[in-house]
Image (cartoon, helix red, strand yellow):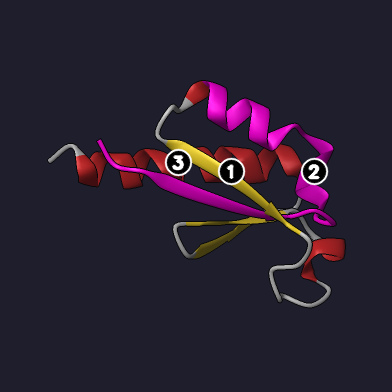
Amino acid sequence: MGIVVVEICDGSLINELDIEGILEAEYPEVAVIESSCLSFCGMCAKRPYAIVNGKRIFAKTAEECLVLIRAHIEAELAEYSL
């Protein structure tokens, strides 16, 4: 099985949810890494986002963003299971 890395900025609006706890409990293959800055200046204060295996995922709300993150994780894991 592969590994999926989800990076979040500690100032991101995505932190309204316990992203690390949620994703790591649901997906043993996922590692959530929280950084002080991911160099997308100002984006963390405007909308929830995360970087999943190098791809930026964002939405209007933290809940919507989590749905998109899960979908991207599922797509990444599907590639590893081929």
Q: Quadrant of the N terminus?
A: top left
> Label 2 vs label 1: CA separation?
12 Å
Secondary structure beneath disc 2? helix
Q: Say whether residue 64 is left or right of residue 12.
A: left
Q: Earlier in the sequence, mark 3 or mark 2?
A: 2
Q: Which mark is residue 32?
A: 1
> Label 3 vs label 1: CA separation?
16 Å
Q: Say whether residue 39 is left or right of residue 28.
A: right
Q: Name which residue lies at 69% across and 68% down.
A: 38
Q: Amino acid at mark 3?
A: Ala
Q: Around disc 1, counting alpha carbons within 10 Å, would you say few (fewer than 14), some (14 to 19), or many (20 or more)?
A: some
Q: Is residue 31 above or below residue 45?
A: above
Front position in the image: 33 or 75: 33
- The residue at which mark 2 appears reads as 15
Q: Earlier in the sequence, mark 2 or mark 1?
A: 2
Residue 51 locus on image (x, y percent):
57, 59
Q: Are marks 3 and 2 in contact (CB under 8 Å)?
A: no
Q: Which residues are magenta?
A: 1-25
Q: Is residue 67 above or below residue 26?
A: below
Residue 3 locus on image (x, y percent):
36, 43
* In front: label 3 or label 1: 1
Q: Earlier in the sequence, mark 3 or mark 1?
A: 1
- The residue at which mark 3 appears reads as 71
* In front: label 3 or label 2: 2
Residue 45 locus on image (x, y percent):
87, 63
Secondary structure beneath disc 1? strand
* In front: label 2 or label 1: 1
